[in-house]
Amino acid sequence: MTSAVGHGGRVLLAFAWQGARTSTAYTTAYWMELLNAAVRVFAVVTVWAVLYRSYPQQFPVTGGQTKTYAAVTQLTAVMLTWWSGAHHRIARQVRDGTLYVDLLRPVSYPFQLLCWELGESAARLGLVVLPAGIPLFVLLGLGPPGSAAGGLLSAASTVLSFVLLYECNFLVGLVVFRTLSLKGVQHAYHALITLLSGLWIPLWLYPGPLAAISQVLPFRSIFYTPAAVYVGYLDGPAAVRACAVQLGWAVVLWLGLEAGWAGTRRALSAQGG
């Protein structure tokens, strides 16, 4: 049992290291990504600061919480690379015919991609998010977590966000095996995340019908939950419930991922792949 766990850990670290090396391979691209993250966070926080000053009565939180929420969601998006995740890697491998290389390895393909994404996200956390985020938090006067417990829950929630986003991306990527292209599907998928995840607009500002829709889909658990817990909008039992919902979605989507991949593997085998 111990040797199996140790082997699994070594496999995870090996693929995570590959992902980290990929995300830091080009110096110019790295500096541009760092600049983009800083400008993006500064711009979004500034916009929400102006909106709060203009319509403070529309917000159920303080101006500081509003600005901090905006910064946390944008930095989380940079770390998780939601726009170009596992679905794009699957599409590229199917298009280039290089998928067979990963399928020949004695490790499940979904686990390989999970570790790869983990390495890339860890690299972005250490090399982009923290170097850009810490100075901006000081410069813009953004606050720490609402409480120590809230900070720990927010960190745990961010880990679950990573898993959830990976699962959603992988499930969308499976479409490529049927269509050979992400076009159309990716636009609809990205639109849903943009609208219902709380990435750009806090879900506490949504009208009743739209808020109700977001409640029954997993996307709110990707960006809204960790940021809302961080700023203290969700605290105590509400924060714990929100994290429990994340965990529930993570389990359900992983089961769906495994079932979807099993069906895809059977189809590939039937076609001689």
Image (tube, rainbow, N blue to C red):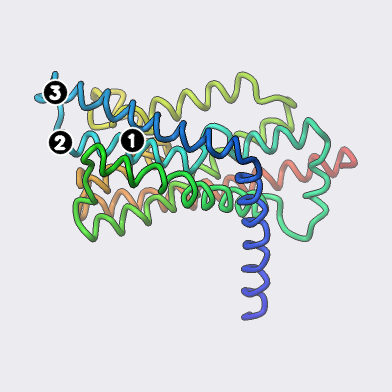
Q: What crowding class fits label 3: few (fewer than 14 Cα within 10 Å), some (14-19), or many (20 or more)?
A: few
Q: Which badge, 3 or 2, comes first in the chain's sequence? A: 3
Q: Measured along the vertical axis of the image, is residue 140 above or below residue 119?
A: above
Circles 2 and 1, Cβ within 8 Å, touching? The answer is no
Q: Residue furthest right?
A: 272
Residue 61: give its label: 2
Q: CA distance from mark 1 to mark 3?
A: 28 Å
The type of residue carrying mark 2 is: Val
Which residue is at a point 75% across and 26% down the rendered structure image? 180
Residue 211 percent across, percent down from the top left = 29, 29
**For the image shown, how many numbered marks are present on the structure?**
3
- Left or right of residue 14, residue 101 in this image: right
User: Under tag 1, what secondary structure?
Assistant: helix
* 3D distance between C-alphas at marks 3 and 2: 12 Å
**Percent of width and height locating residue 183:** 64, 20
The three-letter code of the residue at mark 1 reads Gln
Q: Would you identify the image quadrant in which residue 69 lies?
A: top left
* Residue on which disc 1 sits: 215
Q: Residues within 10 Å of mark 1 (few under 14, many from 20)?
A: some
Which of labels 3 and 2 is toward the front? Answer: 3
Chain-order first, disc 1 or disc 3: 3
Residue 53: give its label.
Answer: 3
Dividing the picture into quarters, in which one does residue 149 lie? bottom left
